[in-house]
Amino acid sequence: MKPEQLFSGLEPLMLDSHLGGSSANPQGAAWHVGNYLMSMDRALLLFDFDAAGSLLNANANFLAAVGYTREEALTLRHDMLCDSMDEGKGIVSGEQIGARLRGGKHFSGTCRYRKKDGSSLWIEATYLPMTDETGQVARVSVISRRSIADAERQEEIRLLMLGINETGNAVAVSGCDGRIVYVNDGFQRMLGFSRSDAVNQDLGELLAGGRPDSGTREELHRRIACREGYHKDVLVYDSSGKPLWVSVMANSVFDERGTLVNIVDVLTDITPTKVHEVLQRRVLQAMVNEASVVEVMNMVCREVERLAPEVVATVVRVDEAGLLRPLAAPSLPQAYADALEGVAIGPQVGACGTSAYLGRPVIVPDIATDPLWDDYRHLPLPDDIKACWSSPIKSSDGRVIGTFGFYFRERRLPDDFHHRLVDVCVYLCALALEREEARARIRQLAFYDELTGLPNRNLLLAQAEQAIARAEPERKRVAVLFLDLDRFKQVNDTLGHPIGDALLRDVAQRLRRLARPTDIVGRLSGDEFVMLMPEFEHGRLTAAAEHILVALAQPFSVGGITLNPSVSIGISVFPENGRDMDTLLRHADMAMYQAKTAGRNRISFFSAEMNRQAQERLALEAALRDALEAKALRLHYQPQVGLKNGSLYGVEALARWCHPTLGEISPARFVPLAEECGLIGDLGDWALREACSQLAIWRNNGLRVPSVSVNLSATNFHNLNLPRMIAATLAEFGLAPADLMLEITEGVVLDATAGTLRTIAELHRLGVRLSMDDFGTGYSSLGHLRRLIVDELKLDRSFVQGLESDDAARALTSAVIRIGESLSLPVVAEGVENEEQRRFLIEQGCAAGQGFLFSPPLPAGDLEEWLRGRG
């Protein structure tokens, strides 16, 4: 393009401006103009475009500057080349400049042109509109030159971009529609999104992490409406979905008409401080609200898992014995958490146990292969837990009081974000655990006896009042046992207070072991203790008190010295002896002094009636002991008869006791007494030996008695020597094992421990037969029957008594006999009293019966006559 072609419309202006307006020498003037235009063409960047913005002409300088060929340039429009125009008062939109030029007004300013390679070129330019003969703007000529400050401007731009891209902040520029048009390099470093990922995306949508319920999207959308600027801490998610806390500063850019043009966002990563702030605020608030340490630890774990969804967080306390006690593991499988309970810390106890033992963090990126998990990897691996990182939680004095654990469902190491979380959480967990220790210590001092660790008077009275309040609406009874050691002052005076204190501690430990889970044990003062027994059975209270009396009389070894203390016990009962704890305690104290007055090592009831019953029971127990020692008990024998042929099936030995002054005492009374006071074993042994001796006598007298049945309790089967003792007894009296039938009750079935089952198995191998007594009356007999080796079932008399009129009794009796048939076991019916019962039992296939229809229980001599009378 020739200069005169480009600037043909500018010649008059040029002449007027640069040649002084003289036309005396037109030829010379033209020569000067031509030379001037060629000089301009060499020095300036020149181009023009039509009213629609299409490029018409451009000189070589301009083409070289923007990097296009002439042919390429002529296909472009002005808005494709120029994207920014600044006349010194701020950025002016292209539409505004276009309107000005179409109105015939020129424009001068700094323009940013887009080069072919995408880079920018800043040029000082003047836009001159040219009109046609109708006065309409037909074309716009642009005279531009490289700015004198172009190099400085380029350096300024370079430094500006350097500052933007190398900052630690993420910068995003969005258009008025909220969609991103530019992000700096820091945006990718911080959030992982490249420019191509970010451009044309809504910032809130991009950083919401695809979470439909995320508040990120809504929060960042608010910044668009904030004309005065926006500053907020927002939880966002990077390209991998990891959460970050960022401080967002957004500034809106408006044009001269106040229209929003751009939004500039600067995001600063504040994750460490924000995580600390959020967690600390929540933990401290929970502690202020008196939340338990378990609640606080669960809150910490859940918050961590919200911030890092790939993590399963746990908190484990380490007790004074070095055992692990899980406090919080909301997302850990419950079976795994339960398996950690009570595990001792050590050098190869997974991650948590090892971390607690070593006092330093332990990272295990692969549980499946790490030797620390040799004994424990079977716990996490089935639940797809593959890596673990545990950090010790230490108190202010350096003790390891717990561990904070991260579990991962993939083989991996923790990243920087995980380290930040753990640093914060370990500190907060230590704070909460130390506070709990302090509170526990304060509670201990306020409510527990420092010497024995039992509840002190304050706590004891409070717990007692609660127990009474629970019992009153349901009309239940509560017993108060006041215990005082006998002659304790002599221990202190002769052996010293350290020995006395040690004895009190040992007594407290024994009382703890003797108490039921529902009982309350406390120390009032000195050698005075109280046991509160809610919901006791009336018949068992004396037995329970006796048991305590006997247990505390057992020797204590204290400081190398053996002591044999005794205790006096006073008992009062709610509501008979008082309706509040103060009254009950006072009355129990009075009863205790009655026990001491009566000779110590005794039980005394405040109630005259209960005291009478207790004294009667104690007297009966003493009499039973004397009767066993003097062999004053005797056996009666009741025959068992085959129902089909009337032959003798066997005899059952039944204990009888006739007291010299009390007369006949029912087995229903003295057998439970023997169980409660620990005499049942001696009673069983006596009955076995007596029955075997009598069977041998009958046989020597020519009487054919097939076998003798003896009732034994569960206590007898606890004796591992029972099979040897029976074998020796049988041998002594010349009897075969099959001559003896042992009747076992449901108590044996319910108490079928490994030792009991072993004893029963040995008796079976010996050849001694077993009969299941009262079969069908206990809820668990059927469930346990398969575990026991029995040879006979006994139908309880309660079924037999209703056979004449009770359809249910008939059905149950028939069912028991059918069970016996299916197991090939004979059934013996108890309590047969009439022919109708006998006929029904025969019809059902019952093997044998016993009862008054045949004979009552008889002394040995009378039974011998009965047998001879049958021929």
Image (spheres, helix red, strand yellow):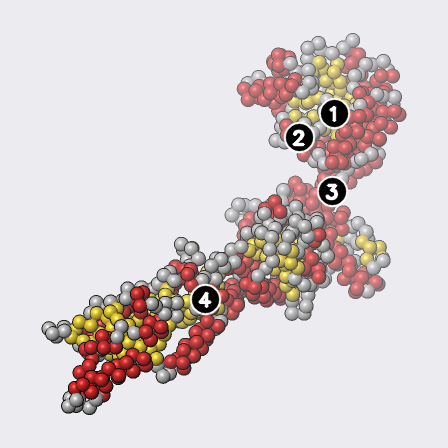
Q: Amino acid at mark 4?
A: Phe
Residue that badge 4 annotates: 187
Q: CA distance from mark 4 to mark 3?
A: 89 Å
Q: Amino acid at mark 3?
A: Leu
Q: Relative to the observer, which residue lies in front, 532 or 82?
A: 82
Look at discs 2 and 3 and give the one toward the viewer.
Answer: 2
Q: CA distance from mark 1 to mark 4?
A: 85 Å
SS class, disc 4: helix
Upstream in the sequence, badge 4 or badge 3?
Answer: 4
SS class, disc 1: strand
Q: CA distance from mark 3 to mark 1?
A: 34 Å
Q: Position of residue 346 (x, y in %)?
A: 72, 56
Which corner quadrant of the image does residue 492 belong to?
Answer: bottom right
The quadrant in which the N terminus is found is bottom left
Give the numbered dot on residue 770. 1
Q: Residue at x 34, y 68 (%)?
A: 68
Give the numbered dot on residue 784. 2
Q: Relative to the observer, which residue lies in front, 603 or 703?
A: 703
Label 4 close to label 3 by CB (< 8 Å)? no
Q: Amino acid at mark 2?
A: His
Residue that badge 3 annotates: 618
The quadrant in which the C terminus is found is top right
Q: Amino acid at mark 1?
A: Leu
